Image (tube, helix red, strand yellow):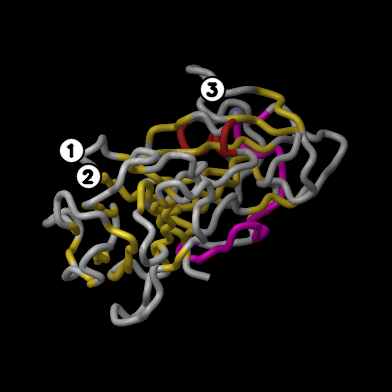
Amino acid sequence: MACRVLQKGVTRITQAYSNKHKAVDLGRSHLTGEPVVAHSGGTVVFCQTGQKNNQNATGNASYGNCVKLDHGDGYATLYAHLAKVNVKNGDKVKQGQVIGTMGNTGRSFGMHLHFEVRKMEQRIDPTPYLEADLPLNKRHVTYKAYTNRWLPEVTDCQDADTDGYAGIRGQRMSALMAKPTHGVLRYRVHLLKEKRWLPWVIDNVDYAGNYGQAIDAVQMHLTGDEGYEVQYRVAAVNVSRWYGWCTGLTDKTGDGYAGVFGKPIDRIQIKIVRRR
Ligand SMILES: [Zn+2]
């Protein structure tokens, strides 16, 4: 298996997560001085040094030399029994940065890394995160489409498969509502028959569209969520392929839009992504 908190990658779990051991122990006993790296970017909020092996240790001393990183959004990771600590309290660290070396300090019975993931200070199972990002700053956008009624709301997020959509294949969409978890989403729709854009609307305060009038284009842009932007695409009635993804406008007067004038839209997908 791979594991991103050990620089050399391949390792094994010597003790799994359980109610009695709310962490995973990662071992590679034939190696000494194995670099331990930050799981994710964050700030050092606890740093304990000068500890020796002490199999009777209790409390924080049982962790031996130890580093805890705060990653924001209520998540922290903790690295215990380190031989050496390379960071100090308050340091900002990047994902993959060496924060210490694997050791056998504190209440430890052999060289290993004791790795905890905490969510709001609850020690959750780290196993799903050994190779994956923490669910930090997840952006979602919820949206729904109107055909002859409001259809169920759809939620999309940056790392989900984007196979969900709002709308019904073959049915003309005439209104749209959307709201992101972060920032403000501004959007407007273009009326097919009247060949004009309706006014911009914000979040789900109002809807964009006129009931009963087919729309053939959509424009969206996201503000107030630095580093993120909206991406959206539409499909048209009797057109089998989705049109290309559009990126949110940085300027709401920009001329990018999803759709083709004259082709009634039946489906839309929206997601919030990190700005490139
Ligand atoms: Zn452990």
Task: Sort mark 2 into few (<14), some (14-19) or many (20+) by Cα contacts within 10 Å.
Answer: many
Q: Residue 58 at x, y = what percent?
A: 49, 29
Task: Sort mark 1 into few (<14), some (14-19) or many (20+) by Cα contacts within 10 Å.
Answer: few
Vertical side of 99 occupied by 157: above or below: above
Q: Is mark 1 within 8 Å of ligand 1?
A: no
Looking at the rendered structure, the kind of residue marked 3 is His
User: In front: 195, or 207?
Assistant: 195
Q: Residue 146 at x, y = what percent?
A: 22, 44
Does the rendering let one see residue 63? yes
Whether tag 2 and tag 1 are in contact, CB under 8 A, the answer is yes
Magenta highlight range = 89-108
Q: Which residue is mark 1?
A: 149
Question: What is the spatial separation of the Cα atoms under label 3 and label 2, in whole angstroms?
Answer: 50 Å
Q: Earlier in the sequence, mark 1 or mark 3?
A: 3
Q: Horizontal placement of 151 versus 84: left or right?
A: left
Q: Is mark 3 within 8 Å of ligand 1?
A: yes
Vertical side of 244 occupied by 12: above or below: above
Residue at 62% in and 22% down: 16
Q: Horizontal placement of 131 versus 12: left or right?
A: left
Looking at the rendered structure, the kind of residue marked 2 is Tyr
The answer to if 103 sits in the magenta stretch is yes
User: In front: 104, or 250?
Assistant: 250
Q: Secondary structure at mark 3?
A: loop
Q: Earlier in the sequence, mark 3 or mark 2?
A: 3
Q: Residue 199 at x, y = what percent?
A: 16, 70
Q: Which residue is mark 2?
A: 146
Q: Secondary structure at mark 1?
A: loop
Q: Which residue is mark 3?
A: 21
Mark 3 or 2: the one toward you: 2
Does the rendering let one see residue 184? no
Looking at the rendered structure, the kind of residue marked 1 is Arg
- The N terminus, quarter of image: top right
